[in-house]
Image (cartoon, helix red, strand yellow):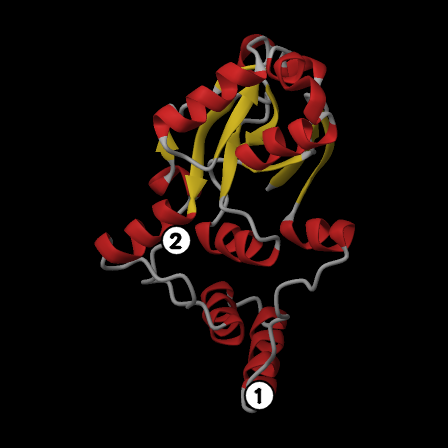
Amino acid sequence: MFAIYNKGSVGFRSTVDNLYELKKTDAPDAVQLKPNDDDLFQEYLTSKKGKDTQQAINAYKKVANIDTSEQVFHVKDIMTLEPVYIDQSITIQEAYDKLKDVEVNQLPVLGFSKKIMGMINKKTILNLIMDDISNINNILNRKIEDIYLDEVLTTDPITDIRRVAKVMLDFKLDAIPVVTQEDILVGIVSKTDIIKAVSHIPKFQLWS
């Protein structure tokens, strides 16, 4: 499940397929049947009519090419817990200093009760300065809550990490905040987290 937040309000919460439709980006490849899958599909239909439940399930697994031995990893299995974030009440200067201190590309911006408001990075700050370069001090002293932040794409803890990895590639994202149904930030998953998972978890495969 994915969600899009704009200034703390949810503008979208749905499946990955609907996300691609919303953003007009190519959706994940559709499942295509193999040459012999027509026979398997007929086997599934026949067994279902005969009310042989186990046979129907086994036939369905063949049709869907389901490997029951393959472990599915969710975002919660690899995400960074208790990620560094900034409060929307701090100044742009303080946000910039925080980005430098923790040596990350971007940070979640949170509002009341840890609800996510957006993401901020050095490019956002630089653009603000360039728009009014004669008033740098005034810009840096403004509070985060007083500036416009782009909408932020989030995911939830139980989303299949393979879907998240594809979304990150397609939408050119370095990281995605992990948010509960109550809009509370509980983690963040980055490209680094995914690379570490591939390197250290023997059974973890991005593309099965």
What residue is drawn where x is 45% and y is 50%?
Answer: 161
Give the SS element for disc 2.
loop
Of 93 and 180, the residue lying toward us: 93
Mark 1–mark 2 contact, CB under 8 Å?
Answer: no
Question: Which quadrant would the N terminus be assigned to in this image?
Answer: top right
Residue 31 falls in image quadrant: bottom right
Q: Which residue is mark 1?
A: 39
Of 11 and 33, the residue lying toward us: 11
Crowding at mark 1 (Cα within 10 Å: few <14, some 14-19, many 20+): few
Question: Which quadrant would the C terminus be assigned to in this image?
Answer: bottom left
Residue 42 falls in image quadrant: bottom right
**Left or right, 143 with reference to 166:** right
Q: Name the disc covering residue 72, or none.
A: 2
Give the SS element for disc 1.
helix
Cα distance in 3D space between marks 1 and 2: 28 Å
Looking at this view, name the residue that lies furthest to the bottom: 35
What residue is drawn where x is 51% and y is 20%?
Answer: 95
What residue is drawn where x is 73% and y is 30%?
Answer: 131
Of 34 and 196, the residue lying toward us: 196
Count the numbered circles shown: 2
Q: Which amino acid lies under the numbered mark 1 shown in the image of this protein?
A: Asp
